[in-house]
Image: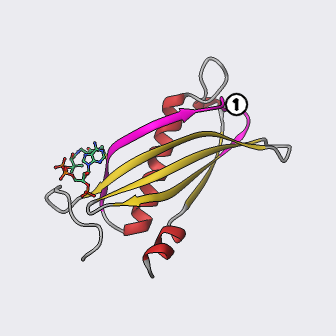
Amino acid sequence: MNYEDKIKSSETHVFKVVFPNTTNHHNTMFGGKVMEMMDEVAFMTATRFARKAFVTVSCDRIDFKKPIPANTLVELIGKVRYVGNTSVKVNVEVYIEEMYEDVREKAISGDFTFVAIDENKKPTRIFEK
Ligand SMILES: CC(C)(COP(=O)(O)OP(=O)(O)OC[C@H]1O[C@@H](n2cnc3c(N)ncnc32)[C@H](O)[C@@H]1OP(=O)(O)O)[C@@H](O)C(=O)NCCC(=O)NCCS
């Protein structure tokens, strides 16, 4: 598989229900919970892209544009945005979907960078030259 095909096929979509155990006192999703879910989806995307052992090294600005109400669905979409020597940057978008109407809007976007590590936990090249 070539590089562009790997980027395309590693695009990762995960749906979740916004159940009460994920919300805050405003009855919207707790920001820290969304960030955890985003990091996990980004990690899955990086792993499915390169099939290497990755650790999170940084996350860039995360924009919370809309509150995510309880009793909705969310879709998280991870896409590889940049590939370095040992690092890969993944963008994650979060969409809100109403459960009983065809209504959908983007709520959050952020970038996560992962580094591939070897058995000594040192950075290792993602692809051989
Ligand atoms: C990730 C880790 C192995 C990197 O080791 P390091 O010696 O700092 O790495 P280097 O300076 O050699 O950089 C390796 C790559 O990471 C990138 N990088 C390092 N710090 C970064 C940062 N803050 N933001 C973005 N990229 C970063 C470098 O640009 C380089 O990318 P490239 O090879 O594609 O050009 C090390 O910092 C670490 O173990 N961190 C803890 C990770 C962790 O526990 N995460 C949470 C749990 S998963």
Question: Which quarter of the image is occupied by the C terminus?
Answer: bottom left
- Give the residue furthest to the left: 120
Q: Residue 22's quadrant in the figure? A: top right
Three-letter amino acid code at the position of disc 1: Ala
Tell me if 7 is positioned left or right of 123 in this view.
Answer: right
- Give the residue furthest to the top: 25
Q: Secondary structure at mark 1?
A: loop
Tally the numbered discs.
1
Q: Residue at x 57, y 47 (%)?
A: 93
Q: Residue at x 45, y 46 (%)?
A: 111
**Which of the pair 24/104 is nearer the observer?**
104
Q: Which residue is mark 1?
A: 70
**Which of the pair 18/45 is nearer the observer?**
45
In the rendered image, residue 114, in percent from the top left (x then y), is placed at: 34, 52
Above-or-below relation of 129 to 43: below
> Is 66 inside the magenta-drawn segment?
yes
